[in-house]
Structures are given as C-alpha cells and as structure tokens.
Amino acid sequence: MLSETPIGFHRYMYDRIDWNDRLIGLKGPRGVGKTTLLLQRAKEALDRNSTLLVNADDLYFTSNTLVDLADDFVRNGGKVLMIDEVHKYKEWSRELKLIYDYHKDLKVVFTGSSILDIEEGEADLSRRVVPYEMQGLSFREYMKLFKGIELPLLDLEDVLSNKVMVPNGFHPYVYFSEYLRTGYYPFSNESQFERRLIQVVNKTIEVDIPQYTDMTASAIRKLKRLMSIVSESVPFKPNHTSISQVLGVSRNLLPEWFVYMEKAGLIMQLRDDTGGIRGLGKVDKVYIDNTTLMYMLGRENTDIGNVRETFFMNQTRVMHDVITSSVADFQIGRYTFEVGGKNKTQKQIAGVSNAFVVKDDIEIGYQNVVPLWLFGLMY
C-alpha cells in the first residue's frame, strides 16, 4: 500500500493536523482521501518498524480486540497505531478510550465515517480525542493535483479585495466547468469514475447511515427515494408534511434523516441564524453536497443557477459558517452575497452594507463584484 501511495500532493488537512496529539480522529465522507492521507503520513514521516496501519473490518478482529492489538503492538516497540474505518468496529469508542488510558506513549490516529459522532460514543472520548473533518477537493487543490498549476491560498478578505495574483496567462474557465462536473473527488481521474461515485452514494445510503440508525430495509428504500426527491428539486425549501406523504413515513422522522444525509456528505442544509450555534438554526434550503454529485444525479437537467450556489456554499463552508440571508442568497459573518451569472445586477443588494455580487463567467472582479471561481481558492 505504501509503495502505491503518491507523494508530492497533500490534501489541505495534512498540514492542519497536529500530529503530536496522542489521539486524533479524522472524519469525512466516503471518497475524499482519508486513507491516502494516513498512508502519506506513514510513508513520509514515520518509522515503518514502529508504525502499524490496520483496517477496522479486518478478519483479525473476528477473534481479537483493538485493545489486544494495541497491547501486542506496544510490547513489540509500537509507537503509532493508525486505524482506518474505525466505524466498522462495534466497540470502537470504549476500546479507544482504554487504549488511550493504558498506553501513554502510543499515538493513535483513526479515520471514520462523517456520520460518526465522536462526542456521543458510548465512552467519553470527547475529552481525549482531537477531531478533524475533511471535505472533498477545492478548486485550488484540483488545479494542483490534476493540472499541476499552483494557485494561491486565500482567506475571505483576500477574495473580497479582488487583489489576487494568479500565474501569467492563467484563464480559470479553461478548467472551471470540468472541476464543477468531475473535480470534487480525488479519484475523479480513475477509470469508471461515475460508477465508483454511484457506489459511494449507494454504500453511504445502504451501509453507513443504517449502521448508526438501525434502519430497516424498507426505511433504506425510502431514504434512497428521499435522495432522489432532493436531487430532482434542489435547492428547495423542505416541506416535511408533503415529503412524508410521498414517502409514507412519519413527518417527525424527516429532520433526522436530513441530518444523517448531511453528515454523510450527500446534502448541505442552509440554516438561518436562530440557533446561534452551528447546526441548530432552522433549515431554509437543502442543496446537494457538491457540484460533482449534482451533475451525476441530475445529468442534463442540472440547473446552472443551482450549480453556482452549490459551489459557493460548498467551498466557503469549510472555513466559515454560511447562513441564509434575508435579502440575498447567503451570509457569512457581516458579509452578504448574491450569486449569479455575469449579467446578475446589484438590485437584490441595493442599500445593503458589506454586500457583494458573486458572478460566474468573469475572470477578475471590480468594486463589490467578485468572480465565483475565486471562492474555490479558500482551502
């Protein structure tokens, strides 16, 4: 596995993780590169004689526990234990706590499904583990990984100032529409990409979500139908009463199902600011999680207006809380954003302070007009 692991390109999360911590948890949707990140760390920075990477659904664990493995490993000089797909191991949280408490000199790094609730594991892991959550490729990462072009890393203030230095002769729209269609997943240049992406969606719905919710086969079928309803009508304001009638499920179940789909990386929910804390506001709109998934599900019916909004929210949410705006499409902190094509006017945000028009199909911005593609350079 190490010999096949590419080096030279790291996902944005690689340098964000403090590898000195004793217990690190890396969550994220299927297919965003969590396993590759662990293998790169092992290959580039760790001693192979004292590092072990295991998959939590290995046959070894049918007759051995994680605690057994850690005990044996430490006795044999082990220093770093990496556990991939920890959610496939039933007692993961309790045993990780024991390993943490027993072995003070052992560092443990684990990956898990983005639905994994580290805070609510049956043992109190939250005081011990340092959690990270990884999303798919930004436009900037895509350009570096697939096109070999280095673009600057920007924060929101840089983007809004429109003072961006890009390589001479660089024209973003040569690449941008390809990114929107296929660029969000690191495996997009592999053969049968679409088939693999369909597998990612199916396994998320059929395996990952039911694993945490004890869903019946009939409920899984309804969840698939719900995903199809969402993909045909995004972005949409969820009407739980009418959807519950179509699916034949209790109206009270739906908010929960939407949260599971959101955590699993299938959808994004745009909330208002009533909750104060992330994730507690009232849901205003539901989007497909990313533009690549949108095109795969919607095919030729994919609406470009929805694609633009989805890209904006998908790329900005990694570093910021994005909420709905009462006058425009989105709000981030004190800034208001209206997203559209190159003919989008200022009408919507007239008289609103700190408001910006985000336009697709323009290369450079001016005054309060910002090119859409620039928001893809924020991680």
Image (spheres, rainbow, N blue to C red):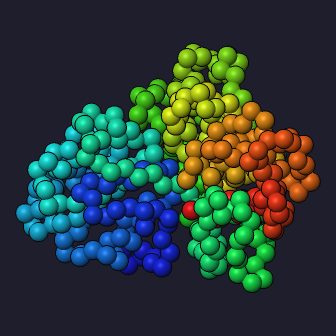
**Residue drawn at (45%, 41%) of the image:** 115
Position of 240 relative to 324 (above/below): above
Considering depth in this image, is 97 or 54 the residue closer to the camera? 97
Considering depth in this image, is 340 or 212 the residue closer to the camera? 340
Considering depth in this image, is 70 or 317 the residue closer to the camera? 317
Task: Give the mark count.
Answer: 0
Q: Quadrant of residue 268?
A: top right
Considering depth in this image, is 91 or 369 the residue closer to the camera? 369
Q: Quadrant of residue 60?
A: bottom left
**Residue drawn at (62%, 37%) of the image:** 269
* Image coordinates for residue 40, horizontal then vertical, percent: 39, 72
* Image coordinates for residue 282, horizontal then vertical, percent: 61, 27
**Residue drawn at (43%, 62%) of the image:** 16
The residue at the far bottom in this view is 168
* Residue 236 appears anywhere in the view: no
* Image coordinates for residue 94, horizontal then vertical, percent: 22, 40
* Image coordinates for residue 366, horizontal then vertical, percent: 83, 63
Q: Is residue 18 left or right of residue 246?
A: left
Quadrant in which the N terminus is drawn: bottom left
**Residue drawn at (67%, 55%) of the image:** 292
Q: Quadrant of residue 379?
A: bottom right
* Residue 32 appears anywhere in the view: yes
Q: Is residue 345 left or right of residue 88?
A: right
